[in-house]
Amino acid sequence: MRGPGALIEALRQMTVIRAFENGIASLKSKGGYGDIAYAYRGPAHLSIGQEAAAVGAAMALTPEDHIFGSHRSHGEFLAKGLSAIQNLGDNALNTVMESHGGGVLLRAVETRLPAENARGLAENFLLMGLLSEIFMRETGFNGGMGGSMHAFFTPFGAYPNNAIVGASAGIATGAGLWMKSQGRDSIAVSMTGDGSTGCGPVWEALNFAGMAQFERLWESRGFLPVLFFFTNNFYAMGGQTGGETMAWDRLARIGAGLRDDACHAETVDGTNPLAVADAVQRKRRLLLDGRGPAILDVECYRFSGHSTTDVNAYRTKDEIAAWDAIDPIRSYRDSLVTEGILDGAAADAIQTEVDTRMKAVFAAAADPEAAPPVRLGDDGARVGGKMFADSETPPDGGPPEPLADPGKVARIRQNAKKSRGGRDADGEPLSPLRAITLRDGLFEAVLSALLSDPRIMIYGEECREWGGAFGVYRGLSELFPHDRVFNAPISEAAIVATAVGASMEGGRPVIELMYADFIGRAGDELFNQLAKWRAMSNGSLSVPVVVRCSVGSRYGAQHSQDWSGLAAHVPGLKVIYPATPYDAKGLMASALASDDPVIVFESQRLYDQVELFRDAVPNGDYRIPIGAPDIKRVGGDVTVLTVGPALYPALEAARSLETRGVSLEVIDARSLVPFDYGPVLDSVSKTGRLLLVSEACERGGFTMTLSSNITRFAFDALKVPPRTLGSPNWIVPGADLEYGYFPQSPDIEDVILTDLMGDTGHSRKGARRWDDLALARSGL
Amino acid sequence: MARVELKMPELGNEITEAQIDALLKEVGDRVSEGEEIITITTPKVTMDLEAPASGTVVEVFVEEDEIVAVGAVLAVIEA
C-alpha cells in the first residue's frame, strides 16, 4: 500500500492497537469492557503510547521478515499481522487461516466475526487469535499454551514474543543466521526494550551478529541481517535506564562499542510512525546488503503501567502529561488532518469502526462458546502431550558436495585403519590409537549427518580447526565451509539462543558447550527457551537442537561437574549420556535426526574409551533409540543402574564381587529423558536389590528420581530399600582427591555388601566412611 | 657434521604416546629447518613435526602406523 491510503492505514492500525489494549486494561481494572463482563486473570503488559513504534516498524517489513518480541509486544504483534494482511493476497490469507490449528479459530471467526472480504476476515482472525490466546483459550494462536507474553503467529512473520527480558535478541540473531545461510531475502528483528541493554545475552547477541568471520571467512560475505530494534520507553519496569540503571547516556551509542560503523545506530522519534518506518526501511536495505547488524533506539513512552499492578510510584504526573501532549495517535491524526489527507469526520469514522470491531472481538473471545477454555477433560496429561514432537522430519534434499574427498582427510583415513572393536585377539583392550573410541563414534554420527542433511550446522567454541576442545570434530574443517562448521565466540548464551532461533527457521544446529559447568552461562537459553517453545507453541514450532556438553575431570570445582540432572529436571529437554563408542554413535544419530532438543553429556574421561561390549562399532549408520537403557552385564543378585562413566567402576566392582559369590547385573541408563523403566523393573524383579550410581552430587540428583520411581513401580519385588551412590555434596576437589569424590569401585562394593547384601562384618574399602545422616544435617 | 635428533614431542600432560600417521621424508632427503617431515596423530590432534635443522635425513626409526612413546627419537638429521 502506498500514498494517502497507506498514511491513513497507519492511523487505523495504531487505533486498532490502542483499542485492543484499552480493552484489556479495562478488563483488568473494571472486570469488563463496555457491556462485556469478564475478569481476565492473566498478565497484561500493555504498550499504550508505543503504537507508532510498532506500526512504523511493521510498515517497512514484509511477511517474510520475522519479528521476535518481548513481554510487552501485543502492539508489535498486531502491527506485524496487520501489515502482513495488507501484503498477502486473498488466496494466501485464506490458506493461512484454513491451515491454522485445523480451522478451529477460523470457524469461530466466521461464525462470530464475519467480514465482507478476506482482509476483513483476516483482521478479525488476527484479533481473535491474539485475544483468545491472551485468555488462554482453545482458539488462541498457540492453542492457549502461550498466553499474553508468548503469543505469536509465524505465517504473518510474528515469531515468539518472550517473557524473558532480552531473550529475543539471541533468538532473532539465530533466525538471521539461518536466513543468511540460506540466502533468504529477509531480515530478523529483535524487538526488546531499553531495559534489555542491561542483559548480558543481548550484548552477546549483538557481538554474534557482527562477527568478523561473516564478512571475512564465509563464502557468502556479509553480516547477519538482524535489526536490534530497542523500544526505548525510558523505563525498565520502574528503574529509569538513562540516568539511573544504565551506563549509557543515549541508547544508540552502544553501537559504537561494537563496530566501526557503530551498527548504523540511530535514535528515532518513536512517536511518529513515519519516522520509524523510514528508519526501519533504511536499516533493512543495509541488512539485506550484508552490512548489518543495525541498532535502532526508538524513543517513545508507555502511558500504561509496567503491568496493571503498577501505581506509577517512579514517575510524576507532569512527566506523563508532557508525553500525553505528544500522544502518537493524536499527533499523527492531527498531522494528517492538517496536511489535508484526512478530514475530521473520516478520522472519527475510523475510531468508530475500530471500537465497534473491538467490542465484537472482545465479546467473542470472552464467550466460552466461541472461544472454549482449554480443559483437561479425561486427559490429565494433555499439556504433557505437547512437550515433545517424538518425530523425525527428513530433509528435502541433500547438502552441497563437501570441500574434499572425505577419504583423504587424515582423521577419516586414520579411523579407517582402526579396529572397529575395542579388544585384541587376547581380549585385552586396544589403545585408543588402534581402535574406534567414543570420540570417533560421535564424530562418525556427526559426519554422516553433515554429509546427508543440509540443515545440520555445527558451532561452538573452537569447533573448526581445533575440532572442538576435545577433538571430536577434528577433520571437519577440511570438509565443510564456515556456513556448516564455525567457531563461535565465548558466548554460551548466544550459542544456545542462536541455535533456538535458527531451529525455528528450519535449521538443525548442533552446538557445543565446552564444559557442562558452562550451562550456567546459558541457563535461560537452555531452560526457558530451548525447553519451552515446542509446548508453548502448541506444537507449531520445533526446536531441533543438539547441545553437546563435556563433563570434565581432574579440573576441579568449576570444570568437573556432571549436571545432567539439571537438564533432566527441566521439562522439555531430552537428555542422553552415552558411555561406550557404540552407544555414542547410535544415540548421537538419533539425536541428530530428532525433531526435539537433545542435550548430550559426554565424559571427558571416556573420549578415549574403546568398545568393550559389542564386537564392533558398525561403520555405517545405525540408531539407538533415546530412552532405552542397556544391560551391559547379566547377573542375579543385585541390579546396578549407572549413569554415564559410572558404568566402568560398577563393572570393576562386579568383577571383584564375583570372586565373593555376589553377582551384579549392570544396566547403563544411557538416557535420562525419556527413560524406559521396563528393563530395570524386569531386572529388579529378578534380583530384588538395586543400587544406582552416578557422578553427579547425590542431593536432588537424577538417580534419586530413578530410585524413588523404581521403588514405587517395583515395591513388591524389592528385598531391601534401594541405594543411590553419587558424589558427595561438596565441590569437586583437585585431581589427586577425585578418588574420594567420584564413586569408585570399592565404594560400590562397600554399599552393595553392607546395605544391600546385609554383610554386617564387611570392613569398608572405599573412602566413604562417613555418616550420611550427620552430613545431611550439616548441609553436606 | 652434527647429528640432530627429532623426538616425539611432549603432547600435553595426559598424552604418553602418539601414532605415526605419515613419513613425509625418507633417508637421503634434504630438508630445511622448519620443513615438515613426519605427521603424527593423537586421539585429539593431527600435527606435522618439523625438521629441527637443515641437512640430510640419515636415519628414520619409525614406520607409518607405529605407536611411539613421547620422547622417543624418530629420526636423525645430519646438519
Image (tube, coloured by chain):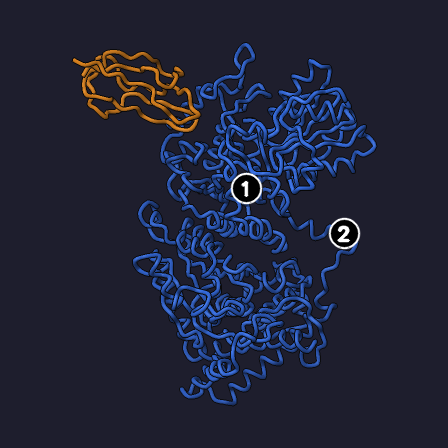
Chain colours: A blue, B orange
Answer above or below: position of A596 versus A720.
below
Q: Which sits in the foreground, A369 or A565?
A: A565
- The amino acid marked with disc number 2 is Asp
Judging from the image, mark 1 belongs to the subunit labelled: A
* Above or below B21: residue A701: below
Q: CA distance from mark 1 to mark 2?
A: 31 Å
Residue labelled with disc 2: A379
- Packing grade of label 2 (10 A; few <14, some 14-19, many >=20) is few
- Asked which quadrant contains residue A715, the reply is top right
Between A362 and B50, the one lying in front of the other is: B50
Numbered disc 2: secondary structure: loop
**Would you say residue A374 is visible in this rendering?**
yes
Closer to the camera in the image, A74 or A666? A666
Amino acid at circle 1: Pro
**Quadrant of the image containing the C terminus of chain A:** top right
Q: Which mark is residue A648?
A: none
List x then y, in percent, for residue A408.
Answer: 37, 26
- Look at the picture and state if A572 lies above or below A194: above
The residue marked by circle 2 belongs to what chain?
Answer: A
Residue A765, image x, y percentages = 65, 21
Residue farthest to the right? A716
> Which residue is found at the position 50% from the left and 30% from the top?
A735
Q: Residue at x 53, y 19 (%)?
A: A422
Check residue A394 in the rendering and tell me which mark sits there, or answer none. Answer: 1
Secondary structure of residue under mark 1: loop
Q: Residue A270 or A738: which is nearer the viewer?
A: A738
Where does residue A356 sit, x and y in percent of width and height? 62, 80
Examine the rendering and report whether any part of residue A20 can be seen. no
